[in-house]
Amino acid sequence: MAYNTREIIRDVRKNPIPQYFNETENQYQPVTGDKAPYTQIVDVNGNPISSENRLPVDAQLSGSFNAVVFEYLNSTLNLNTVGNRWYGANAVTGTTNRRPADVSRFSKKLVYVKNNYNVTAYVIVNFYKDVEPFSGSAHGPFIYRAVDVEPVPAGAAAIFSIDTEPKMGLPAIGLGVNIWADNPTEGSIDIVLIGGV
């Protein structure tokens, strides 16, 4: 049968849950843990694309997004811990000396997160009125939250831009990303911030 002839799965409050249609089983199945749908991009020889085996692209950033503000690849700041990790002008594990990245010259901001951990990671993106360092708080004196605790399942990637999060287009001087993960025991995370006009 086709997907449109089957009832979707709902939680106890009758709300739809994250799910996909399994054509082999002919039913919807929940998206959970390592049972989630998985797609892997490979090169022409069938090798998985990774930070070591990058997809060969003969192009440069142009148009509306044209500058990498920061890039943290293979970060393991969350490994074997529970709590927020900060990514901005610096990447830190504690709540001391967190510095927002300067995005003052960009009207558009795009945050890419690839979760290579073995657990779900949660993303928060805050905008700041300056780029002064702050301490003693996970989020500091932000002026607004552009992304509010968005889950990125293990093995998945997410892009947060004005297309998905309207507040990503608001003006700001600084930007910081908090990643929270519940005690991952293996893997890493990739975070890239791209700015544009």
Image (cartoon, rainbow, N blue to C red):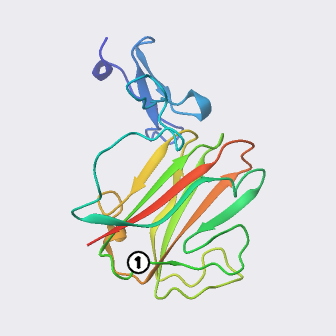
**Looking at the rendering, which quadrant does residue 20 occupy?**
top left
The count of marks equals: 1
Circle 1 crowding by C-alpha within 10 Å: few under 14, some 14–19, many from 20: many
**Looking at the rendering, which quadrant does residue 179 occupy?**
bottom right
Camera-nearest residue between 132 and 183: 132
Q: Is residue 124 left or right of residue 68?
A: right
Q: Taking 10 as reference, is 2 above or below it? A: above
Camera-nearest residue between 116 and 22: 116
Q: Residue at x 29, y 16 (%)?
A: 2
Residue 98: % across, % down: 63, 78
Residue 176: % across, % down: 52, 72
> Which residue is situated farthest in the right direction here?
80
Residue 187: % across, % down: 66, 43
Q: Quadrant of the C terminus?
A: bottom left
Residue 147: % across, % down: 46, 64
Q: Residue at x 40, y 39 (%)?
A: 55
Q: Quadrant of the N terminus?
A: top left
Q: Residue at x 30, y 18 (%)?
A: 5
* Badge 1 element: loop
Q: Can you identify the residue that label 1 sits on?
A: 103
Q: Taking 130 as reference, is 67 above or below it? A: above
Q: Which amino acid type is shown beneath numbered disc 1? A: Val
